[in-house]
Amino acid sequence: MRQIYRSSLKHSCNGRSVVTGPEESATLLRSADEGRVVQPDVMAKWTANAPLAFIDQYIDSLRRYHAIAIDVGDQDGLRFDTQKLHAVLDNYGIKNSFEMYQGTHTSAVADRFQNHVMPFFSQNLCFTVAASDHLLVQL
């Protein structure tokens, strides 16, 4: 299964839809007449769901994956955490591939899916027929 570390959050700011990454996470705000106000509940969820915060508790599950691929743009605010995620997997001896491409968090998304994500799935998803003739998907 491809692990895509994409942690953008879509929210509304001054009536506009805004996408932020972790570099802006300290400013996850809601508009208020007197200015912007940090939303502690959003910050808590953001922090609790960061892959680096919970990876250690899922190592046994990650070891069962057939394949893990991680990619990130060289101008993406997530690049440092993504490199750390790759290093943590390596330190646990979990096979994974890591690629840093030229661009930002959203550069060439269609191209990346067509030429990287879909071929990865094609090569790494295994379909088998069980004795009960049900199709099982193994990741």
Image (cartoon, rainbow, N blue to C red):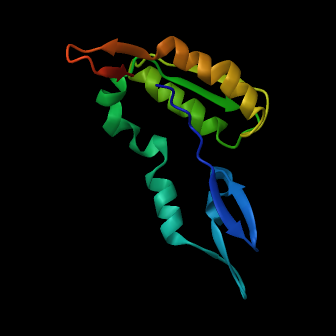
| Residue 105, quarter of the rendered image | top right
Q: 112 or 53, which lies in front?
A: 112
**Residue 7 at what x, y percent from top left?**
58, 46
Residue 138 appears left or right of 12: left
**Residue 125 at what x, y percent from top left?**
45, 17
Residue 81 appears left or right of 95: right
Tell me which residue sits at (69%, 23%) in the image: 114
| Residue 30, quarter of the rendered image | bottom right
Q: 70 or 133, which lies in front?
A: 133
Residue 114 appears left or right of 86: right
* Residue 64 visible within the image: no
Q: Looking at the image, is 69 positioned above or below residue 9?
A: above
Tell me which residue sits at (48%, 22%) in the image: 68
**Which residue is farthest front?**
133
Tell me which residue sits at (66%, 27%) in the image: 113
* Residue 11 visible within the image: yes
Q: Looking at the image, is 81 positioned above or below residue 48?
A: above
**Residue 48 at what x, y percent from top left?**
43, 54
Quadrant the C terminus occupies: top left
**Residue 33 at what x, y percent from top left?**
73, 88
Q: 117 or 36, which lies in front?
A: 117
Q: 131 or 106, which lies in front?
A: 131
Tell me which residue sits at (31%, 29%) in the image: 61
The total of numbered circles placed on residues is 0
**Which residue is farthest left?**
131
Q: Looking at the image, is 80 positioned above or below residue 16?
A: above
